[in-house]
Amino acid sequence: FGHGGHGFWLQGPGVEVVDNIATGAAQAAFIFFTASSEAEFSVANLDDPTLAAGRTTVPVGTVPLKRVSGNTAFASGTGLETWFHLTHMNDGQSFIDHMTTWNTDRGIFTPYPGRTTIRDAVVSGRTDGGWLWGTGINRNDVTNNMTYENIQVVGWEVGISVPVNRSSVIRDGSFRNIRDIEIETAHDTIRTVDIVGDPKFL
């Protein structure tokens, strides 16, 4: 893991990542890969011990992220990635705040997470009036229960590729892309997409 050229590789959710800059990464500038077949997370380190339901340790992929805020990525393959995080959980919530990405092949990629909110992010493709052929905020077919709150996504072929499972919420924000919000066919029977607040399509 972490051998392909990354800025910050985090194998668990228990580290605060605040006000960092990563550039020149061949792959992801920031990546959370919170999965392990062996490692457990001590309940003593949980912000909310009730999530453990009486256990002394829990799998690392079931633990919400510590504070992740104010980070910047540029001149890299991807700005931010989250893998195998809260994938099938019904409790807990992770927040990624004030993430800025620019001059990346893709902005934010979220394969296999659930219950994650991205707030106040800036995800820039091209800023010269053209478009970068790619997706600003992308996912895979397992991603679920995502919230995108007050995000600015500009300069991409696709702004947000909305998850195909469970609940997705897009609240406020501004968009200037060839296709701002792409909603593909649902992959489950309870999938919903809510676009609320006052989003701006420029």
Image (cartoon, helix red, strand yellow):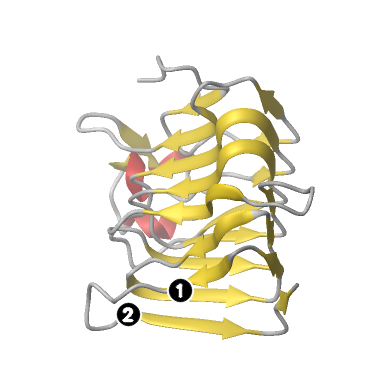
Vertically, is 148 above or below 198? Answer: above
Taking the image as shown, residue 97 lies to the left or right of residue 1, namely right
Quadrant assignment for the C terminus? bottom right
Quadrant assignment for the N terminus? top left
Q: Residue lying at the far front in this picture: please name it.
A: 130
Q: Position of residue 59 (x, y in %)?
A: 29, 42
* Circle nearer the N terminus (1, 2): 1
Res 69 quadrant in image = top right
Q: Determine if residue 192 is in view.
A: yes
Q: Residue lying at the far right in this picture: please name it.
A: 128
Residue at (48%, 41%) from the top-left corner? 81
Q: Position of residue 33 (x, y in %)?
A: 39, 35
**Disc assigned to residue 4:** none
Question: Which amino acid, mark 1?
Answer: Ser
Residue that badge 1 annotates: 168
Question: Which amino acid, mark 2?
Answer: Arg
Q: Determine if residue 65 is in view.
A: no
Q: Secondary structure at mark 1?
A: strand
Taking the image as shown, residue 171 lies to the left or right of residue 53, namely right
Q: Position of residue 164 (x, y in %)?
A: 33, 69
Residue that badge 2 annotates: 191
Q: Position of residue 152 (x, y in %)?
A: 71, 61
Res 100 quadrant in image = top right
Label 1–label 2 contact, CB within 8 A: yes
